[in-house]
Amino acid sequence: MGTLRKSIDGHVAVITIQHPPANALSTQVLEDLSVCLDELAEDQLVRSIVIHGEGRFFSAGADIKEFTSLMDGSDYAGLADKGQQIFEKVESFPKPIIAAIHGAALGGGLELAMACHIRIAEGNAKLGLPELNLGIIPGFAGTQRLPKYVGTAKALEMIGTSEPISGKEAFEYGLVTILAEDEDQVLQKGKELAHKFAEKSPQTLAYVIELLNSGKVYSYEGSLKLEGKHFGEVFQSEDAKEGIQAFLEKRKPHFKGN
């Protein structure tokens, strides 16, 4: 995958976006990301993932030059549909995905970060959806995910003015959950959190991710039933037996993923 680099340390995979100068999310980057996620879904050793960008930015947006090669509205709608599907794959991925943001996450870059389960950013990073400056609108579900984190009014302010907010402000609004001092600490904190996730039983994490997103599909009552179903299922696993036994023996559990 020419636009991405994948490395694995223990149970943690790090996906590095390598598309200079700004790590723009071209069609190739999106396709490479989709393939990479498919591979990691099948890799039983990998239990959590960190995504970050090489160079100065996490990702400074979509590939604007690529836009000029499209012919009509249906081409652009198709591009949006592809991006939405891939970012939905990120959000519903059964293993935790952490966005480690430095420099800037703008436009499609922020939309990718919002699809990740958790966002970590340095205080001076810039996060925003500046599409209206180009006379266009967000197309990779930015209008749907941003209000979930900052509220509808703040989302309109950010999109309508096209003005980015800092990582520190994003932390205060809840768009970012962990704040870091600089780029190195962003990646370090991302890996530390990923390793903590990797210590847990992978099936329990997969169920939790599914349940946290179940409101997109089920009613509240339906989500409760799904939670009860999975609650019963996990107790039949070897990991549950190990976890309970470790608790009784006052030791750290060693989950094997079964």
Image (cartoon, rainbow, N blue to C red):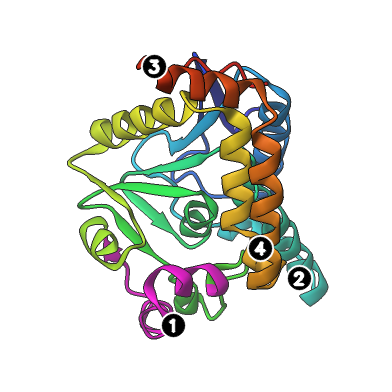
Q: Secondary structure at mark 3?
A: loop
Q: CA distance from mark 2 to mark 3?
A: 50 Å
Q: Where does residue 126 sit, x and y in percent of width and height?
A: 30, 58
Please give the residue where the numbered disc 3 appears in the rendered image. Answer: 252
For this rendering, which residue is in front, 224 or 24?
A: 224
Say which label, 2 or 3, has the lower sequence index.
2
Say which label, 1 or 3, has the lower sequence index.
1
Which numbered disc, 1 or 3, marks the residue closer to the eye? Answer: 3
Q: Residues within 10 Å of mark 3 (few under 14, many from 20)?
A: few
Please give the residue where the numbered disc 2 appears in the rendered image. Answer: 77
Please give the residue where the numbered disc 1 appears in the rendered image. Answer: 152
Q: Residue furthest front?
A: 248
Note whether residue 68 is visible: no
Three-letter residue code for mark 3: Lys
Q: CA distance from mark 1 to mark 4?
A: 24 Å
Magenta stretch, main secondary structure class: helix
Q: Residues within 10 Å of mark 1 (few under 14, many from 20)?
A: some
Say which label, 1 or 2, has the lower sequence index.
2
Please give the residue where the numbered disc 4 appears in the rendered image. Answer: 223
Q: Where does residue 103 sit, x and y in percent of width and height?
A: 31, 47
For this rendering, which residue is in front, 101 or 76?
A: 101
Q: Where does residue 170 sit, x and y in percent of width and height?
A: 29, 62
Q: Residue furthest right?
A: 74
Which segment is the magenta one?
Answer: 143-166
Q: Where does residue 164 sit, x and y in percent of width and height?
A: 32, 68
Q: CA distance from mark 2 to mark 4?
A: 32 Å
Q: Residues within 10 Å of mark 2 (few under 14, many from 20)?
A: few
- Which residue is rendered at x = 53% and y = 81% of the image? 135
Three-letter residue code for mark 2: Ala
